[in-house]
Image (spheres, grey):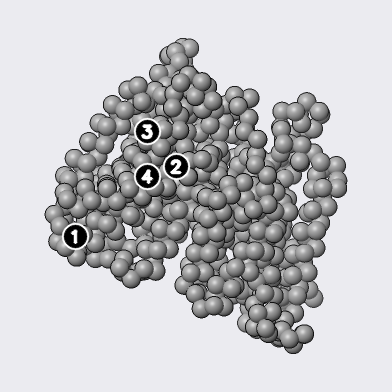
């Protein structure tokens, strides 16, 4: 049974776990209304920080991961304030430019190994990634139902109204952005120490698009949507491998149909017939909006 | 001095191709408020159409190719509008995210189909049909193809400018871009205007793709990604939603790119747009030629 082989494949499971981490980081910024695409860049920073520490200094996995997270957080803290002056498409493009610049540096600098990449010994097994993902999921779940999570939701739905309710919107956005970068750094460090080899191409435009699809297909409506999307799509993409050249066509069709039929993602699907008129905990508005609908 | 003029000219030719691509992106963002990730795929398909149609009609193969590129681009845009954007609008989906992701899916389908049609390798035109002869004109070397591309692109851009700023259709397009609800109240068929904006944008992308394919002498669906990044950089440089700003931004990017290669930094050629994008947005978020959009509460 090829499907069963797929489900029992430890390599694929590892990738699904790491994609889930990245998708959660993207969800954190979406959840407070930030349309940020800097995740691949922060992941690359974490991956190279950890990879270089391991190959050059032989640091143990825990220390190198902590250092990778710290590197992403420091850089995020520096760029957050000027970046978050922008909103919507402008922020998306600026953060996208940031990712491209990280890519260009990684591709051309000598200490990163340039386009030939960096070989890193295997230091992290799947169970390590499971632990990391479980901790991050716990964190996101607690955050979502806490005062901060609700405040972030208010910011996403209407920034002006949230500000009027004495919510320090700008500060929440910056904190979300930095925490999201920290998760990316964590994922990058695990990626570097799990996949034997990192190259700038791992963190390019393709990765951003994939994460985007994971989160939106999974649904921004529930916090676990990102994980559902990442896991589901990782396996679906792999299961479609026998289609060879037709795979991107079929995959694109699935994505498009999924978005058109379920714009709130698979976890946003509501059984209207059974649950009448009960508004969601996170507000009735469609969460595919990164901005308040107030007109 | 010769070299400088030569590079400037090459940069301008490249810039007009970029301009054709970027104005379409601006149009669709301004009128539909959609970030179209499939615009690069429309561009690539314009090139695919140009290569496939080459030689179908005897006499004027290049003209037929260019027309094929335009038709392919416009056709795909029409299909996307009907199959994706109209459906999402009918469901009253708000925000940028869902339509943007749907266009990502569309781009995958188009690039994948391009790979199926052309195979994995870029497809050149049949052997030797595009003879590139350079003529020495006033200190610089110019090929007939470059002149043709430049002329076609300039005509198309001027025509677009006239349509947008001088005709009834253009006035409706600008009204819808400014405020769709008010436009609707004034009796403008918003859906029709949006569809025509998408089709015009697709036709421009197809034209840009056909012209680029003619200058490069190859077509490939995988051209889509690189040009998309450049297109985003250009519309930011020019200020979102400004057609004339996008044209200036495209020319600037073309010249900067050629200059990067000319001074021996060819490894950084593709970094130029990203760097420009980042610096401009950090320092002047409204773009070089744009006005700050009034934020509506």
Residue B104 placement, left or right of A219 = right
Name the residue that disc number 3 marks: A225
Tell me whether the residue at label 4 lies in contact with that at label 1, contact meaning CB atoms closer than 8 angstroms.
no
Alpha carbon separation for disc pair 2 and 4: 7 Å
Q: Residue A248 in the image: x percent, y percent?
A: 46, 53
Alpha carbon separation for disc pair 1 and 3: 33 Å
Q: Residue A50 in the image: x percent, y percent?
A: 24, 56
Label 4 or label 1, whichever lies nearer to me, is 4
Residue A284 placement, left or right of B10 = left
- Return the mark for residue A81: 2
Alpha carbon separation for disc pair 2 and 3: 28 Å
Q: Which of marks 1 and 3 is nearer the N terminus?
A: 1
Residue at 49% across / 64% down in the picture? B271
B10 vs A82: above or below: below
As helix, strand or loop, the secondary structure at mark 3 comes to helix
Q: Residue B34 in the image: x percent, y percent?
A: 60, 42
């Amino acid at each position: 049974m090829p499907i069963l082989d797929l489900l029992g494949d430890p390599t694929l499971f590892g990738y699904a776990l790491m994609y889930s981490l990245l998708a959660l980081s993207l969800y954190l910024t979406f959840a407070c209304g930030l349309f940020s695409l800097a995740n691949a860049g922060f992941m690359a920073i974490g991956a190279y920080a950890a990879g270089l520490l391991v190959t050059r200094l032989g640091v143990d996995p825990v220390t190198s991961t902590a250092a990778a997270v710290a590197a992403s957080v420091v850089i995020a803290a520096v760029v957050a304030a000027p970046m978050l002056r922008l909103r919507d498409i402008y922020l998306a493009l600026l953060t996208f430019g940031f990712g491209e610049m990280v890519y260009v540096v990684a591709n051309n600098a000598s200490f990163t190994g340039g386009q030939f990449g960096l070989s890193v010994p295997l230091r992290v097994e799947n169970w390590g990634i499971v632990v990391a993902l479980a901790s991050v999921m716990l964190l996101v779940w607690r955050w979502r139902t806490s005062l901060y999570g609700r405040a972030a939701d208010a910011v996403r739905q209407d920034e002006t109204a949230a500000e009027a309710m004495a919510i320090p919107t700008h500060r929440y956005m910056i904190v979300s952005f930095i925490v999201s970068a920290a998760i990316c750094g964590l994922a990058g460090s695990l990626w570097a120490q799990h996949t034997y080899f990192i190259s700038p191409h791992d963190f390019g435009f393709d990765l951003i698009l994939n994460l985007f699809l994971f989160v939106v297909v999974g649904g921004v409506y529930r916090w676990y949507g990102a994980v559902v999307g990442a896991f589901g799509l990782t396996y679906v993409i792999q299961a479609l491998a026998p289609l060879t050249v037709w795979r991107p066509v079929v995959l694109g069709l699935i994505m498009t149909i999924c978005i058109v039929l379920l714009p709130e993602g698979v976890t946003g699907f509501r059984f209207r017939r059974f649950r009448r008129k009960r508004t969601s905990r996170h507000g009735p508005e469609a969460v595919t909006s990164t901005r308040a609908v107030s007109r | 001095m010769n070299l400088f003029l030569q590079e400037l000219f090459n940069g301008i030719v490249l810039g007009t191709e970029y301009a054709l691509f970027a104005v379409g992106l601006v149009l669709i963002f301004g009128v539909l408020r959609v970030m179209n990730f499939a615009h690069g795929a429309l561009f690539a398909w314009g090139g695919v159409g140009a290569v496939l149609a080459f030689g179908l009609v005897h006499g004027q193969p290049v003209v037929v190719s260019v027309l094929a590129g335009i038709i392919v681009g416009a056709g795909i845009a029409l299909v996307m509008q009907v199959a994706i954007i109209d459906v999402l609008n009918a469901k009253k989906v708000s925000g940028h995210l869902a339509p943007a992701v749907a266009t990502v899916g569309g781009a995958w389908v188009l690039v994948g189909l391009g790979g199926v049609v052309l195979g994995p390798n870029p497809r050149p035109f049949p052997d030797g049909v595009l003879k590139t002869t350079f003529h020495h004109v006033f200190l610089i070397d110019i090929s007939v193809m470059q002149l043709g591309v430049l002329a076609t692109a300039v005509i198309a851009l001027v025509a677009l400018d006239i349509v947008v700023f001088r005709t009834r259709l253009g006035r409706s397009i600008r009204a819808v871009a400014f405020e769709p609800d008010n436009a609707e109240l004034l009796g403008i068929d918003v859906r029709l205007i949006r569809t025509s904006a998408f089709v015009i944008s697709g036709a421009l992308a197809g034209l840009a793709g056909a012209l680029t394919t003619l200058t490069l002498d190859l077509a490939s669906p995988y051209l889509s990604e690189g040009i998309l990044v450049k297109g985003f950089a250009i519309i930011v440089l020019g200020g979102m939603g400004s057609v004339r700003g996008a044209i200036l931004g495209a020319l600037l990017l073309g010249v900067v790119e050629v200059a990067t290669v000319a001074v021996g930094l060819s490894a950084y050629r593709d970094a130029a747009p990203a760097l420009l994008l980042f610096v401009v947005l950090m320092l002047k978020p409204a773009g070089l030629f744009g006005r700050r959009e009034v934020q509506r509460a």
